[in-house]
Structures are given as C-alpha cells and as structure tokens.
Amino acid sequence: MYDTDPSTFPGQDSGPRSELRFHNDYTSGDAQFECDMKIGAGTHRMCVMQVFGGATSATAFMTLAMNTDSINYYDSTTQIYAPVYDKYIRLNVVHETGIGKIHIFVNRQYRTSFNDRGAATHYFKAGLYGRAGMSARSDNYLKNIHIYRK
C-alpha cells in the first residue's frame, strides 16, 4: 500500500487501508487471533492488527509497525516485539473479556498484556490501516490465520 492511495472512507478515517475484518463478533468469553505475519522493511505507523471494540475507544487493542523494525502498542514507544521486518513472525493475540485483558505472544513466547478498554462487541482485523505520518510504501503479508473461541 502507498501513502498516496485514496482513503477508504474519505473524511471518516486516517487514510488508506487494506485489511481483513473477521466476522467473529463476541462480547464475552475468550477469543484468540493467530497468524504468521511478515512486515516489509520500512513500514512505519501502520496498524497491522487490532481488536476492535471498546467502551472508551473504538478499539480494544492495536499494534502498529514502526520504523524501529518493531511492532508497538498503538503508536506509542511501548514495543511489543523486534525485529519484525522481512521475516515471518507468529502473532497470537488472546482476549480474555472476563478480566478485561489482552495478552500478546510472538513466536509462541509471551510478550506482554494490556487492558482492553472496556466491554463492547469485539472482533479482529488485520492487514494494513494507514495512520498519519505513515511510510510512503507499506507491506504486510498474512498466512495461516486461525481464530479460536472459548
């Protein structure tokens, strides 16, 4: 995707996007997203995965590819994992709605947990979602996608 691509929803979002929206809507229980993901070198300020739905925000969780060769919590300096460029990583995102926590695993190793921003109808999205200041070109490849419920 290029930063010059047209906005998917002009005036209603932050720019171009090419993402998958999974129809796994849930309000309770546990849900898990798993995939092998490869982010192209130089991809910056691009959302690559999100848990949609929150009481205090539109999303419960987002991870952005940053020019530090990492994926971060939203666009903060809170790094989830590095390096990520040009190699597949196994990403698992586990949402426990009962305790309001989202747990992140990379390559089958626990990385960190975050609060989920409140009860809502949630679902998963992955791909590329442009943000202000995004790189001129961004690449994200997904395979072996699985969604689990408990």
Image (cartoon, grey):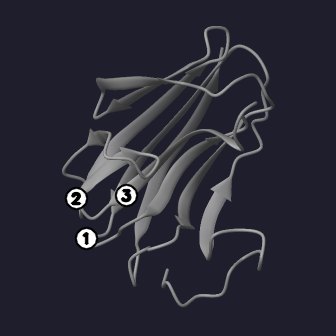
Q: CA distance from mark 1 to mark 2?
A: 7 Å
- Give residue 111's position: percent from left, percent from top: 30, 27
User: Residue at the spot x=76%, y=30% of the render?
Assistant: 55
Residue tagged 3: 65
Quarter holding the C terminus is: top right
In the rendered view, does 132 fall on the left or right side of 87? right
Tell which of 37 and 113 is nearer to you.
113
User: Residue at the spot x=72%, y=76% of the render?
Assistant: 8
| First of labels 1, 2 by sequence position | 1
User: Which amino acid type corresponds to the residue marked 1 in the rendered image?
Assistant: Ala
The image's mark for residue 95 is: none
**Of helix, strand and loop, which one carries label 1?**
loop
User: Residue at the spot x=66%, y=16% of the render?
Assistant: 97
In the rendered view, does 46 fall on the left or right side of 24? left
- Give residue 103's position: percent from left, percent from top: 45, 23
* Vertical order, 68 against 104 (above or below): below
Q: CA distance from mark 3 to mark 1?
A: 10 Å
User: Which amino acid type corresponds to the residue marked 2 in the rendered image?
Assistant: Asp
User: Which amino acid type corresponds to the residue marked 3 in the rendered image?
Assistant: Ala
Q: CA distance from mark 3 to mark 2?
A: 7 Å
- Give residue 82's position: percent from left, percent from top: 21, 47
Tell which of 14 and 103 is nearer to you.
14
Tell which of 42 and 91 is nearer to you.
42
Quadrant in the rendering for residue 149: top right
Q: Are marks 1 and 2 in contact (CB under 8 Å)?
A: yes
Residue tagged 2: 69
Between label 3 and label 1, give the one nearer the viewer.
Answer: 3
Residue tagged 1: 41
- Give residue 29's position: percent from left, percent from top: 70, 13
Q: Are marks 3 and 1 in contact (CB under 8 Å)?
A: no
